[in-house]
Amino acid sequence: MLRTWIGLLGVVLVLGGGPASAQDYPNRPVRLIVPVAPGGALDLIARAVGQKLTESLGQPVVVENRSGAATVIGTDFAAKSPGDGYTLVLTATTHGMISALNPKLPYDPVKDFTPITLIATIPHVLVVNPSLPVGTLEEFVRLAKSRPGAMAYGSVGNGTPYHLAVELFKQMAGIDLVHVPYKGTGPATADLVAGQIQFMSVDMTVATPHIKAGRLKPLAVATARRMPGLEVPTVAEAGYPGFEVSSWYALSGPAGVPPAIVSRLHADTVKGLADPVLLERFAGLGATIVGSTPAEYDAHLRSEIARWTRVVRAAKITAD
């Protein structure tokens, strides 16, 4: 009889554990993995979101930087963590590109994660050194076609968003530019300003200070509509419809996070993103708040993976 009661008690605990844990969530600190080193837009956005979630969840949301291997180390750690809502990860544009570059990736960027929300986007702008004798994107393309392989563009490394964005544009425009990878945004933009390279696709966070100072010349923005305060057309208006590129940032958990916890995290994150102070902070980065549903972010991620896989294969790009 004692064994029977113990067995029944075990069944009750097992069956009741899921809903109870979701109802009690969170009852301890939550870890937010950032797969890059401190500093930069991804880290700043993670800390802003983490602070708002700390306030709404009533438990500390601790940002933990786990950098290395082009975000793979930290993202893999998150993927292999329990799907209980106590480990989250902030992913970015690279998450939608890396599987095309690394066939031995230790995780699946879709299947091994639970989507929560697409937080924000920062649009790219196509810029040149002001000494280049062009004033429009059309003029740049004509110049590039007259000098095949003679002009260079910079990026922050092979297979990075800045690299693949230009590779996509090269394929659409039918031009030949030489890729020069750098170890960081600073050195790449410094060489563009100095005229060592001629062209880049960079996000507005990086480009805006240089554009305002006259150190870089914008040719077009990679958005669906023109950007206020930037008197240039969209890339689509300049003759290349479909070229829309943004740096993006999203919140996810490991696979298997209970729907009730996903709903709580989504609602609290979206509520936090509406805070005027946070809106102003994001605007200072050139970011546009999104706050998508989990399903919308999932669709966005799948679309990004498909698009960049086509670009990588067409350009025959391999990981370093």
Image (cartoon, helix red, strand yellow):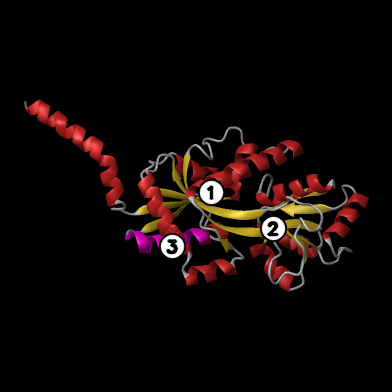
What's under tag 2, amino acid-wise?
Ala
Magenta span: chief secondary structure: helix
Relative to 106, say whether 70 is above or below: below
Q: Which numbered disc, 1 or 3, marks the residue that appears first in the sequence?
A: 3
**How far apart are the alpha carbons under marks 2 and 1?**
18 Å
What's under tag 1, amino acid-wise?
Glu
Q: Are marks 2 and 3 in contact (CB under 8 Å)?
A: no
Question: Where does the magenta region start and end?
Answer: 45-58
Residue placed most toward the observer, 52 or 264: 264
The quadrant of the picture occupied by the N terminus is: top left
Residue placed most toward the observer, 33 or 145: 145
- Mark 2, Cα crowd under 10 Å, few <14 / some 14-19 / many 20+, is some
Q: Which residue is mark 3?
A: 271
SS for dot 1: helix
Q: Which mark is residue 224?
A: 2
What's under tag 3, amino acid-wise?
Lys
Give the mark count.
3
Q: Which numbered disc, 2 or 3, marks the residue that appears first in the sequence?
A: 2
Residue 108 falls inside the magenta stretch: no
Q: Is residue 220 left or right of residue 247?
A: right
**How far apart are the alpha carbons under marks 1 and 3?**
17 Å
**How far apart are the alpha carbons under marks 2 and 3?**
26 Å
Q: Residue visible at 82% across and 54% down?
A: 239
Residue 56 falls inside the magenta stretch: yes
